[in-house]
């Protein structure tokens, strides 16, 4: 344990900073996000591979495509739920390590599939691992990031996912030129290799200091905080000390509070968090992003492009999305999460309305100008999504929760991600074959309502520590970080395991 010793206080403010160690740790954690992105997008290029179509889609192609997409998303929903007890009990890092093993095995099964039932089962299994990753990773990232750059740091989840989309799309294009029956299997061989890299990476990053403290492991939490925040500009670990005191005080105050989903739904403050978290991804998925991402090659085919151009345009499309996510980090701390999401929801809806109108009048025609305009609108749409929606959505749905409920809260936010994706994706193949461009308006109508509700109902969180966000939802903040006099706080090891960690609150005066 540690105890507190008092020194003469000048109450100099703690200067916020982000160390290279902190950044490297975030980037290492983002290899998990990359694995989700590759798992999700691998199927988009695979569906355009001739060898895959001949092997699995020779009969009832529309229903089989819907089943393949739904299998992964259903598994993702399961993964988003099961990660919560694993992450809460064993830690954020072991949870992602387990997920990496699942993805690796699932990738091998997909690569070796000999009939459609085996491939579908492997996609479900892959979805479970990927669902665990996309839900647990931003929890970890938010818990190791300083308040002033937390949005930027957690944005690495969105950046890594879109980077994986680029790699997957480029490899799909490259594999198109492999003239062999195993052509389509190569995507999943590569996925297995990336999952192995993730397994190894998880050994080298620290556990979340908030999880450690919530589980009574104060010594380890302090060591992690020092490692993350101590630098040449902060040799005395002032930021680490301030964070330590605040996290400890807030966790002690919340220890007596109930946990679990029933408490979340029956307590007005946690219920508001749940509504906000779910609304974010109801809006995000109602932009149509995943439907368009999974069907990009087919949609480009509908605009009259050849097989090679379909794959090439898909790679360019996800690259434009990535450019948006890279720039998103420059906005997230400046304009705030809620404003950024609101702008994204409205602008994506406008783009999708224009796209639907263009497809109504020009698909199936030889009007080159109209077809090019429809293609360009796809690119404008995905850039806006990357710039305004992808990154703040992952950040907001995890940072609004207290430490003891963060995994459950992440489940609520990302379960809505998967549920809405299933709702839109599963019938998409049939919808595009029947009602065509009108299907966009189903998503647009929901997106506009959800965006308006989000702007009206959900509070801003930018610039606040995870502990101080509690006040935005009506909960008490044990101590503000600006009130902590770190010059009166000395954290030292104690042989007495029963000594209280913080003996008095004098240091907060």
Image (spheres, rainbow, N blue to C red):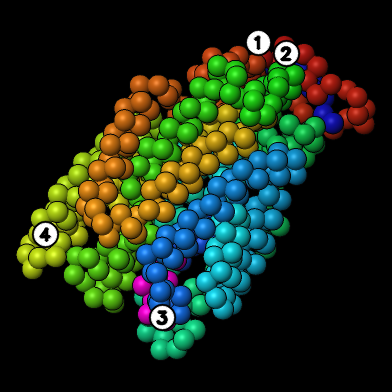
- Which residue does the numbered mark 3 point to in the structure image? 54
- The magenta region covers 43-51
Question: Alpha carbon of mark 1 to alpha carbon of mark 4: how far?
Answer: 68 Å
Is residue 413 depicted above or below 465 in this figure?
below
Q: Earlier in the sequence, mark 3 or mark 4?
A: 3
- Label 2's element? loop
Residue 78, image x, y percentages: 60, 48
Pick the front one: 81 or 339: 81
Question: Alpha carbon of mark 3 to alpha carbon of mark 1: how far?
Answer: 72 Å
Residue 89: quarter of image:
top right
Q: Is residue 505 left or right of residue 179?
A: right
- Label 1's element? loop
* Residue 509: assigned label: 1
Residue 147, image x, y percentages: 53, 32
Q: Is residue 442 left or right of residue 137?
A: left
Residue 3, image x, y percentages: 82, 25
Q: Residue at x 42, y 60 (%)?
A: 66
């Amino acid at each position: 344990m540690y105890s507190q010793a008092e020194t003469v206080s000048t109450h100099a403010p703690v200067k916020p900073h982000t160390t290279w160690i902190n950044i490297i740790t975030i980037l290492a954690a983002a290899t998990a996000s990359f694995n989700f992105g590759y798992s999700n997008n691998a199927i988009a290029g695979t569906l355009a591979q001739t060898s895959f179509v001949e092997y699995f889609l020779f009969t009832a192609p529309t229903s089989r495509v819907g089943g393949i997409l739904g299998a992964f998303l259903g598994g993702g929903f399961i993964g988003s739920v099961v990660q919560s007890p694993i992450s809460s009990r064993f830690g954020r890092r072991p949870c992602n390590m387990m997920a990496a093993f699942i993805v690796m095995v699932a990738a091998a099964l997909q690569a070796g599939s000999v009939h459609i039932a085996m491939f579908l089962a492997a996609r479900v299994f892959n979805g479970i691992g990927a669902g665990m990753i996309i839900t647990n990773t931003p929890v970890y990232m938010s818990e190791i990031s300083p308040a002033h750059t937390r949005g930027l740091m957690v944005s690495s989840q969105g950046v890594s996912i879109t980077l994986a989309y680029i790699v997957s799309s480029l490899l799909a294009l490259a594999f198109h030129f492999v003239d062999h029956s195993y052509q389509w299997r190569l995507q999943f061989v590569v996925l297995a290799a990336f999952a192995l890299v993730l397994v190894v990476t998880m050994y080298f990053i620290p556990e979340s200091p908030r999880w450690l403290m919530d589980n009574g492991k104060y010594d380890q939490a302090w060591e992690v905080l020092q490692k993350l925040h101590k630098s040449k500009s902060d040799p005395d670990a002032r930021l680490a000390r301030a964070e330590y005191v605040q996290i400890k005080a807030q966790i002690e105050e919340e220890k007596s509070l109930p946990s679990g989903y029933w408490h979340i739904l029956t307590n007005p403050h946690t219920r508001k968090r749940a509504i906000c978290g779910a609304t974010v991804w109801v809006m995000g998925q109602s932009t149509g992003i995943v439907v368009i991402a999974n069907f990009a090659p087919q949609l480009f085919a509908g605009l009259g492009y050849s097989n090679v151009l379909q794959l090439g345009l898909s790679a360019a499309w996800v690259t434009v999305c990535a450019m948006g996510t890279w720039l998103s980090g420059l906005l997230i701390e400046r304009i705030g999460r809620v404003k950024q999401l609101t702008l994204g929801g409205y602008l994506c809806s406008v783009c999708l309305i224009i796209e639907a109108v263009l497809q109504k009048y020009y698909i199936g025609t030889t009007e080159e100008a109209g077809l090019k305009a429809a293609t360009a609108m796809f690119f404008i749409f995905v850039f806006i999504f990357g710039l305004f929606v992808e990154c703040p959505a992952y950040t907001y749905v995890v940072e609004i929760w207290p430490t003891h409920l963060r995994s459950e809260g992440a489940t609520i936010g990302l379960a809505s991600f998967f549920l809405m994706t299933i709702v839109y994706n599963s019938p998409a193949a049939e919808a595009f074959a029947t009602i065509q461009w009108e299907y966009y308006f189903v998503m647009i109508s929901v997106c506009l309502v959800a965006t308006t509700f989000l702007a009206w109902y959900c509070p801003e969180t930018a610039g606040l520590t995870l502990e101080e966000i509690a006040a935005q939802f009506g909960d008490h903040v044990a101590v503000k970080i600006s009130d902590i006099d770190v010059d009166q706080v000395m954290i030292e090891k104690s042989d007495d395991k029963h000594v209280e960690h913080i003996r008095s609150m004098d240091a907060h005066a």
